[in-house]
Image: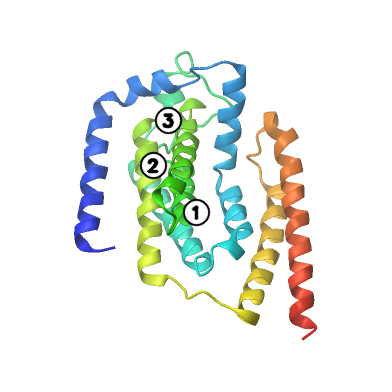
Amino acid sequence: MNIAKSFLYFILFAAGLFALLPLNQQLFLQINCFGNAATDYLFLLLTALADGFFIVLFILLLHPLRRGLLLPTLYALAAAAILVQIGKSWFSLPRPPLMLGMDQTCVLGHVFSTRSFPSGHSASVFVFVRYITDKLPARYSIPFFALGVTAAVSRAYVGVHFPVDIWTGAWIGYWTTDLMYRFFRHSSATGADFERGIFISSVTGILVTATYLLAYDEQIKELIIPLIPLSIFLLALFVWRSYAYGKRLFNK
């Protein structure tokens, strides 16, 4: 990313931030639970899939199709998470249920009251958006950006973040990934190195999925039916892939 492009990104971020600030609460109230039971469930599902656990799993799953991007993307995800946590601790802003009161806030899923700014889910989603759209033509990238925006906006829909939190988190995720790709992009491995990378990413996927299933304490009870089978399917896929590529590696 050159200096001119970085400066343009900063101007766009700052302009969006200052435009959102005076409308922050009003816009939140317009977005928060604006639909019916079907849209409630859809946005709750999107917000759950925007969780860092699933973002890591999707990145690991797509590793064979996005050669050379796995490690810099994981670096970006870790860096974005650190920046988000620094922001949350530094600003320590209240979330909508605490700032506006539960009588004005519709909350779907878990209720959070503190450490609102910035949104970690939005950062994770836009790490993934940058990952999946890398070097894609614009016409193919637009649907992924639209899905990323919808998933990020779901954080306001379910009542846990203001638009300013979402905007800032999204820019942290996208910017951080852009920088990591600039400085740490790995060459596309081939042959045994490529197979070894898929094996390692698959074993990592097994560990992450097992942690989600056995130890993650923020699972949303309304989404047990779709997410638990999805997690088991991903676990089985990672087990199969690690076996297939492990067999190739260790039988050579």
User: Of label 3 and label 2, which has the lower sequence position?
Assistant: 3
User: Of label 1 and label 2, which has the lower sequence position?
Assistant: 2
Q: Which residue type does callout 3 highlight? A: Arg
Q: Residue at x 48, y 26 (%)?
A: 157
Looking at the picture, tell me which residue is in the foreground, 63 or 21: 63
Give the tally of numbered discs: 3
Q: Residue at x 53, y 23 (%)?
A: 107
In this view, 234 is above or below 100: below
* Closer to viewer: mark 3 or mark 2: 2
Give me the disc on residue 95. 3
The spot of residue 4 in percent (x, y) is 19, 58
Q: Looking at this rendering, what residue extends furthest in the top direction?
A: 103
Look at mark 1 in the image and give the residue it sits on. Answer: 132
Q: Which residue type does callout 1 highlight? A: Ile
Give me the disc on residue 46. none
Other-residue count near label 3 (Cα within 10 Å), few / some / many at <14 / 14–19 / ≥20: many
Q: Which residue type does callout 2 highlight? A: Pro
